[in-house]
Image (cartoon, helix red, strand yellow):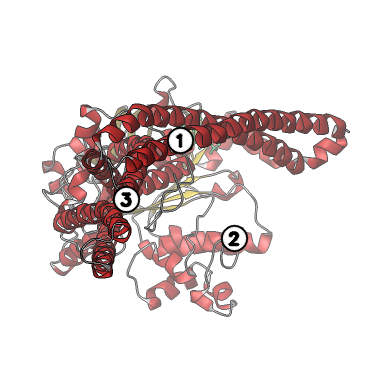
Amino acid sequence: MARERLNSSNPAAQEVPKAKINKQSLNKISYLLKYLRPYRWKFSAGIFFLMLTSVAMLLIPNQMGKLIDAATQSLEGGPGSVDRIALVLLGILVVQAILSFFRVYWFVEVAEKSLAQIRKDLYNKLIRLPMEFFNKNRVGELSSRISADLSQIQDSVTTTLAQFLRQLLFLVGGIIALTFVSGKLTLMMLCVLPLLVVVAIVFGRYIRKLSRKAQDQLAESNVVVEETLQGISNVKAFTNEPYEAKRYAGNINRVVSIALKNAKFRAGFISFISIGLLGVILCVVWFGSRMVYSGEISIGDLTKFILYSMFVGGAMGGFAELYTQLQKTVGASERVLELLQEGHEPIEVSLAEAETAKAEAATAGMRAVATPAGVATTGTGGATQAGPVTAGAGGEGHAGPATYGTGAGNPQAASATTPQEKTAGHQLRGSIIFDQISFQYPGRAEVPVLRDVSFEAGVGERIALVGPSGAGKSTIASLVLRFYEPSGGRILFDNIPSTEFSLSDIRSQVAIVPQDVLLFGGSIMENISYGKIGSSRKEIEEAAHRANAHEFIMSFPEGYDTVVGERGVKLSGGQRQRIAIARALLKNPAILILDEATSSLDSESERLVQEALEELMKNRTSIIIAHRLSTIREADKIIVLDKGKVQESGRHQDLMLTDGLYRYLTGLQLEA
Ligand SMILES: Nc1ncnc2c1ncn2[C@@H]1O[C@H](COP(=O)(O)OP(=O)(O)OP(=O)(O)O)[C@@H](O)[C@H]1O
């Protein structure tokens, strides 16, 4: 059945899997109904209007029958009664149209607003999920899954539910009306029609399955085209054109054979429909005509009967598709709920909130008091659900399930609040101690990544981490940022165990300049101010100056307002690095993590980046993940890692004196 799309949902990019509808699943999704609560009156009014319009529709065949009877039997009223009935019919149509307008508008309004809130909550949840979640789930898949699931839910609120109720009314009302017209005819029709509808549904499903198979096969053949064209040089170099041509032909032949099988069933289906369903109607008309002939019913009654039969038949046929849609909606809702209930990191739900808190604290002469773990985001009924991270809009007085995800399953969220309250407002000086840290990623618990790693970084020191690929350098950076908690040992900031700080308090004082700088699709100005949301143009320009970025930014016609990323100017690696450095300068962190880019820049660009980095590292503790050992000769301490263990540590000169891994790696790089 072609389903109308009334809302802003995208055509589901992905087929939404079905789920069983049972008490348990319905119980679960009733949670989502909370999102409808603020609009319950409009929604109820919509349902009421839907019922009224359905009843109005059911009245139409009755009036049509009356109209025909009035015309054929020249009732007492003469032509006047015909006009009167026609007027009533017109009245029904007008009322029906007005009610439908409000019904459709309200349903769409309720769906758009409640779905907007689900989207905001889901997004707020997603950005606060622990890193482990993103290791387990592919981001691309996740976002298309969510968009398909939300579209499915939105369609259900606007369309499926309405159709389901309307069909139900048509079925019940239609059968009652049929019985009133003629019990005998109704009985005859009901003996055959349901059977035919069931056969048609089963037939239809089988055909759909075959079409899907043909589509899959076609998609497979497209993969062959894609693969070969992308790797065309390989195909040519191996003179494998005949092989590829044969592979493609095989695929296409399979598509044709499935499509032909499908065509056989489709043709059979169409014959069945014309013989079966139209046959029933024909029989009813024939039998009915005989009843008219014998005076048992009037022509008007027969017309009514045929029209009501169409209502009933249509409703029966539609239920199967509607049921499938409801199953999909249940599945979609379950998945959305699962996400909403995932345990998350105890970070403020909206930046607006966090910023206000910080500003208030700053004016009070102290740093923002960190929200106690697990409390900031939970609230009791939406007080903290200020909407999107960027604005705090929403403002619908949403009473949605702000109580979700109290951090269950997330050890960070469950930790005690008192020590964090004590450290709240602590301005880090920047000393870091790794005390016998061992760690394995939660997703690969059997593989130790760090073993007994201990080192110290004094305030303002430069610590370089070196070692072969996979040694655990980036993992150490992740632990400093508390993306994960160590499985053994302690990390101390300013001699205070890391767990005594809130996540936001640590992360707001640590900056990272990554290898691959990700710029958002906004302006350069916005990209730099990401380091400190709300900073002034002057601050941003100053940071850009210090990061050696001002000059190249001003070389663009639109200067700081130049849009970067896919739809804007494409920046070089060195330019991106300098933007990231400006961002970090603006943040002014106590601790800096520098993941040195592996790909080398040209010497001028390298000089500019290096200068900017020197500026950035001034007066703060820096942890440098070094790939090119020549850049870290001046480091206060070099930690040499191998297979998750500290092999040696010291200054460059000392390490070069011993015949260890560092000297070996340096030698290798010099040779290269
Ligand atoms: N998210 C993850 N889940 C599971 N294992 C991981 C994850 N990230 C890294 N690892 C593993 O942890 C080990 C250390 O990785 P890490 O990225 O810290 O190494 P590295 O020294 O930074 O390497 P490189 O110089 O290549 O970046 C590797 O064996 C890696 O496969």
Task: Give the vertical position of 297 relative to 212 (above or below).
Answer: below
Give neighbour class at mark 2: few <14, some 14-19, many 20+ (Cα, 10 Å). Answer: many
- x%, y% of residue 155? 35, 49
Secondary structure beneath label 1: helix
Residues under labels 3 and 1: Cα distance? 68 Å
Residue occupying the far right of the picture: 239
Which quarter of the picture shows residue 366? bottom left
Would residue 454 appear left or right of 228 to someone viewing this image? Answer: left
Secondary structure beneath label 3: helix
Which quarter of the picture shows residue 352? bottom left
What residue is shown at x 53% (from left), y 69% (from top)? 548
Would residue 213 appear left or right of 348 to someone viewing this image? Answer: right
Q: Which mark is residue 422?
A: none
Disc 3 vs disc 1: which is toward the camera?
1
- Does the rendering let one see residue 578? yes
Would residue 498 appear left or right of 550 to someone viewing this image? Answer: left
Evaluate if marks 2 and 3 touch, with contact meaning CB atoms under 8 Å apart.
Answer: no
> What residue is pinned by disc 2?
574
Q: Nearer the viewer, residue 540 or 616?
A: 540
Q: Amino acid at mark 1?
A: Leu
Mark positioned earlier in the residue sequence (3 or 1): 1
Q: Nearer the viewer, residue 91 or 450?
A: 91
> What residue is pinned by disc 1?
277
> What residue is pinned by disc 3?
507
What residue is shown at x 25% (from left), y 27% (from top)? 22
